[in-house]
């Protein structure tokens, strides 16, 4: 059994990660760290785990010698601080999956591999120790563009409008997450300057070194709890049949990304680790619609996927989930 620990166990992504790990056939969840909840039952914070996490309590400790892998579900900046303090004393065989944005940019200053499996599966399997989980918007947008970049077809500006559920803002209440504001409401935020653009550009330039165009990204806050729908479009010379085949070929041996002939909606993917893509061609533009669950494919599901790869498991293990479609 793989023994796992979680640092930062009180948030939405941690709650989903706990749910996945306690139901994973090859994992023993050894401890869940939360300094603010130490000593409290896990199900007091994550009430959806009543009956599943009975007898499990948060701890203020992080017993690294008791686990094979740790997951960081901490706020951005905290993993890097932790690694600077404790990184030199880590057990040799310990694996790390970081869900923050601290190590997503591969700048030569750290050992983390960028953990988008549809891009870096081989690198993760072939000896990686530390994995930096992708951002949720970044996951949806990159999966919409990887096949084009691989075939050197990103030769115009890329337009993206993507809407996300309120859980993407985290569990800590804020003025734009309060129910009375968020319900029956939408708003744009961080236009053209979202932090996920850095990792998206990194990936696209890895596959297509000539890519030098703008990604014009409009993030939108949605009036729903979870999910991301990204509408991505650009000029492209491919015929629709050629484009669909290109996407089907790219994702043919990937277990969680699917190309559909029907326009998808969020309920196709909520509560799953799937990304569903729909390809359309209108005049000279190709339009890719990408839908994911921001807490699973956009965070905790991919974290478990990466853990499976790190330990040589079949990558769907513990992730065969049915969408909450009705």
Image (cartoon, grey):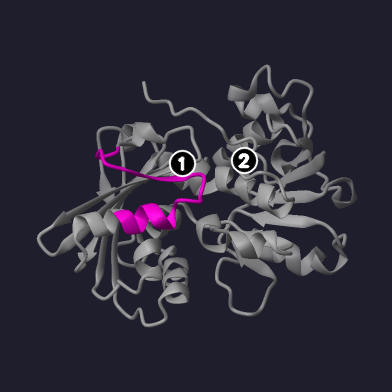
Residue 250 in picture, x, y percent from top left: 42, 58
Q: Nearer the viewer, residue 158 or 182?
A: 158
Which residue is located at x 37 percent, y 52 percent?
Answer: 248
One can see residue 189 in this view: no
Above-or-below relation of 12 to 213: above
Residue 121 in picture, x, y percent from top left: 59, 59
Does residue 276 appear to the left or right of 120 in the view shown? left
Which residue is located at x 70 percent, y 64 percent?
Answer: 126
Residue 297 bears which disc, if any? none
Which residue is located at x 74 percent, y 29 percent?
Answer: 40
Indicate which disc, 2 or 1, sits on the residue closer to the N terminus.
2
**Which quadrant of the view contains residue 53?**
top right
Does residue 17 appear to the left or right of 275 in the view shown? right
Which residue is located at x 67 percent, y 54 percent?
Answer: 97
Q: Nearer the viewer, residue 207 or 157?
A: 207
In the picture of the structure, the residue carrying the numbered disc 1 is 274
Tag in front: 2 or 1: 1
Residue 14 bears which disc, if any? 2
Residue 223 in picture, x, y percent from top left: 31, 36
- Neighbour tally class for label 1: few under 14, some 14-19, many 20 plus, Cα within 10 Å: many
**Which quadrant of the view contains residue 103?**
bottom right
Element assignment for label 1: loop
- Neighbour tally class for label 2: few under 14, some 14-19, many 20 plus, Cα within 10 Å: many
Q: Which residues are magenta?
A: 245-264
Does residue 301 appear to the left or right of 85 in the view shown? left
């Amino acid at each position: 059994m793989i023994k796992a620990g979680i640092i930062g166990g009180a948030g939405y992504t941690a709650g989903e990660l706990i749910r996945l790990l306690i139901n994973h056939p090859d994992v023993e969840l050894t401890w869940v760290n939360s300094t603010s909840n130490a000593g409290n039952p896990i199900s007091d914070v994550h009430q959806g785990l009543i009956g599943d996490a009975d007898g499990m309590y948060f701890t203020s400790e992080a017993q690294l010698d008791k686990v094979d892998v740790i997951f960081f579900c901490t706020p951005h900046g905290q993993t890097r601080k932790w690694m600077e303090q404790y990184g030199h004393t880590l057990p040799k065989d310990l694996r790390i999956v970081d869900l923050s944005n601290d190590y997503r940019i591969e700048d030569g200053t750290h050992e983390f591999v960028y953990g988008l499996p549809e891009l870096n599966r081989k690198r993760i399997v072939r000896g990686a120790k530390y994995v930096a989980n992708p951002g949720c918007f970044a996951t949806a947008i990159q999966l919409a563009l990887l096949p084009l970049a691989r075939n050197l077809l990103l030769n115009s500006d890329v337009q993206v409008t993507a809407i996300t559920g309120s859980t993407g803002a985290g569990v800590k209440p804020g003025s734009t997450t309060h129910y009375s504001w968020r319900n029956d409401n939408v708003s744009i935020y961080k236009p053209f300057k979202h932090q996920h653009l850095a990792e998206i550009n990194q990936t696209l330039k890895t596959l297509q070194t000539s890519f030098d165009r703008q990604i014009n990204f409009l993030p939108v806050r949605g009036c729903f709890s979870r999910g991301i729908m990204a509408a991505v479009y650009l000029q492209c010379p491919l015929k629709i049949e050629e484009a669909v085949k290109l996407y089907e070929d790219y994702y043919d041996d990937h277990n969680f990304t699917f190309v559909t002939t029907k326009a998808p909606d969020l309920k196709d993917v909520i509560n799953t680790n799937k990304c569903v893509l729909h390809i359309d061609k209108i005049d000279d533009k190709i339009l890719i619609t990408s839908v994911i669950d921001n807490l699973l494919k956009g965070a905790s599901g991919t974290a478990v996927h990466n853990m499976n790869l790190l330990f040589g498991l079949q990558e769907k293990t513990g992730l065969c989930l049915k969408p909450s479609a009705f």
